[in-house]
Image: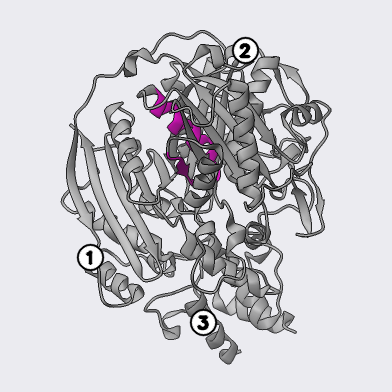
Amino acid sequence: MADEIKSIYLGPSSLRTALGDRKATLKAILANRTGLGYDAQLGMPLGRLADEEPTIEGESRIVSLIVRRVEEVLHEARLEGDDPSWQLILSTTKGNIEALQGVKDTISEEAFLHHTAERVQELIGAVRSPIVISNACISGLSALIVARRLMKEGVCRHAVVVGADLVGEFIATGFASFKSLSEEPCRPYDAARDGLTLGEAVAALMLTTDEALADEGMVRLDGGAVTNDANHISGPSRTGDGLYYAMTQALEEAGLEAEAVGLVNTHGTATLYNDEMESKALFLAGLDQTPMNSLKGYIGHTLGASGVVETILTADQLRAGVAFATKGFSTLGVPCEVRVSDRIQPLEKRVAVKTASGFGGCNAALVLSMERTEEQPLRPTVDVKETATYTLPQSERPFAEFIREEYRALGEEKNMKFYKMSDLSKGLYVAVANLLKGHELQPRYTSTEVAVVLANSSSSLEADREHQRLVDQHPAEGTSPAVFVYTLPNVAMGEVCIRHKIQGDNTFFIEREGAVVAECYARILLETGRARAVITGLAEKLDEKWQLELKLLEAK
Amino acid sequence: MEQLILELKEHLIEELNLEDITPEEIDAEAPLFGDGLGLDSIDALEIILILEKNYGVRLANTAEAKPVFYSVKTLAEYVMQNRK
C-alpha cells in the first residue's frame, strides 16, 4: 500500500492570526502592515488575535478556535466530521494552560493537552482518536512531518494538522524571564534586533493524498526532517549544525539539491542568537544566497502554531510566485551574509524550505514544492529489532530521594546539570542511561542516525504547575527561567540528546494512555531508513507517580 | 564584605541547585562560569533574579552583567555599590 502513495498535497486551510483570517493576513502582509501592537493586559508588544469569534458554550477559547478552523477545512474539502478517512493532528506547546491558574495541587483534566484534542474530536464527531504533538516551537512542523510520514505509510488519506497557541501570563512571564522579549515589535535579522514578540494563532491545514482536494497550485509537501543540536536546552547552537542537518535531510527526502530552492521561510524570531544561528545553518546548507524571510514581524512568534501558520503562508508565497518582505528588517545584523527579503520580490523557483528551531535544542525543516521532481526510489525494507528494554523501578521513597540515588548508582562522572533538571528530565536521564548500558550507541551509529520518540499523558504539567505558582505570586523580580525552560516535555529529550550526543529525530507525543503512537512512529522511522536506532516509550512523571518504560529499537 | 560573600555563595548553592557543594569549596576569586560549577546561560539569568530579589540590585541583561559575573567577589562588589 505504501508504495502507491506518491505525493502529499496541501489541501484547504484556515487560520486566525493577529492580522485576521487567511485573506486578511495575506492582504496585510502584501501591504507591509504589522499585526503587532502594544498589549495593555500583558504590558508588551504582542500579536493578539484579531476579530475574536464567540466561544462555543461550555468550551475553552482554544477549543472553540480550533473547532472552527477544522470545520472550515472539512467544509471546503467536502468531508464530513465523521468520515473515517481523515486524521486530526494537533500541535501545541501549552494548549489550554489557562486551566492551571490558581492551581493548588490537583491539576484539572482541562489542562491536559489530550483533553483539548479530545474535546475537538467530540465536537467535530471525528472517528479517529486525535494525535497530539508537543515539541516546543517546532511543534507545527513536527506535526506536518508526522502527518506526511503516516500518510506515506497509508495510515490515512487526509490529515488535518492544527497548530494552536494563545498567549497569557504563563507564556509572557516565562519568555520575560529569559530576557528574550523585545520592547518594540521584533526586527528579524536586523542589526538593531533585541528580542522576539509573542503572537497568538490558530491554524488548520489539510494534507491529502487526493489530487482533487489539493489547494490552488498543487503545492506538495515533498520532504521533512527533525534534528537536535545536542548542545543546550535553551541556547541555540553556536554552529548551526542541527538546523543544517534538518534542512539537508529534508531536501534529500524531496530529492532536491540546495540549488533548486527559491525561498527559505525561516523561524527568524529576532532574538540575537537564534537569527545568528540560522544564518550559519543557511551558509552550511548552501542556502545563504537564496532569498529568505521571516514572518514574525507581521504576526509575532506564534509558538506551537507557527509551523502550521507559516507553512500555509509560505505555500501562498509559492502560489503567488513572490517572496514577502521581512517586516522590521533594514540592516543585516547576522554573521553570515544571508539574503533577507526586504521587499516583495519575484521567486525564481517554486520550491521553498520552511524551518523552525526551539527549546530542547530541536530543529525542523520541510520542503514545499510546485515543481515536478523525480520520484524518490523506495528504500529497502528493514527489520526492526527490540534490542533493549528498561523500566525505572517504583519506590516507597519520595521521588527526589529515589532518583538522586538512582543517579549516583549510574556511576558516571558528576554532572552538575542533573540537579537542576525537572523531575521528568531526571527520570528520563536515568532511565536512558540504564537502557543504553551494554548497548552504547557510539561508535556504532553517527549522531544523526539515532532518534528519540516518546510519549506521556501529562506533557510537562508538573513543571507547568511550578511555573504557574510563581506567576500567581507576581514576584517583582519575575519568574524563574530555570523552571520555565522545563515547561515543555521535549526538553527532557533534549537533556538526553546532550548527554548521549543524539542528533536525529526528536518527537514527543501526548497520549492519554501508554506510548502506542510513539512506538508506531519510531518503527516507521526505522523501517523507512530515517533512523537506525530509536529510543522510544513512555516518559511520565506527575506528583509521586512515575512511569519510565523505555525500549531501544534498532534496524537490522 | 566577607559576610556578603558567604551569603552570596549560600544563595548560589540554594538557587542554582549546586548539589554537594559547600561555600568553602567555592573560590570567591575564581571564574564563576569556568568548568567547576558547570554554570550556563540559564544560571546567569537566575543570578540576576537572586541579586534583585535579595538586594534590590537590577541588571538589564546578561551582556551588561558579564564583568559583574566574573566571580563571587565581583558580584559582592557590585552589590555593595548598588544595593538599596
Q: Main secondary structure of the magenta part?
A: helix
Name the subunit of mark 2.
A
Is B16 drawn above or below residue A506 in the view shown?
Answer: below
Alpha carbon of mark 1 to alpha carbon of mark 2: how far? 54 Å
Q: Residues within 10 Å of mark 1 (few under 14, many from 20)?
A: few
In this view, the residue in front, A78 or A548, is A78
- Check if residue B49 falls in the magenta segment: no
Q: Around disc 2, counting alpha carbons within 10 Å, would you say few (fewer than 14), some (14 to 19), or many (20 or more)?
A: some
From this view, report whether residue A115 is shown above or below residue A103.
above
Q: Quadrant of the C terminus of chain A?
A: top left
Residue A518 as seen in the image, left or right of residue A41: left
Q: In the rendered structure, which segment of residues is drawn in magenta? A: A129-151
Tag 1: amino acid: Pro
Which of the chains bears the disc numbered 3? B
User: Gap between marks 3 and 1, in whole Å?
Assistant: 36 Å
Residue closer to the observer: A136 or A516: A516
The secondary element bearing badge 3 is classed as helix
Query: Of the numbered discs in the image, which one, if any, rests on residue B9?
Result: 3
Residue A148 magenta-drawn?
A: yes
Q: Is residue A237 visible?
A: no
- C-alpha span from label 3 to label 2: 63 Å
Q: Nearer the viewer, mark 3 or mark 1?
A: 1
Q: Position of residue A52 (x, y in %)?
A: 76, 44
**Residue at (63, 57) in percent of width and height:** A171
Which amino acid, by three-letter code, is at mark 2?
Gly
Circle 3 packing at 10 Å, graded few (<14), some (14-19), many (20+), is many
Residue drawn at the location 42% of the way across and 51% of the way down: A494
Circle 2 sits on which residue?
A217
Q: Residue furthest bottom?
A: B3
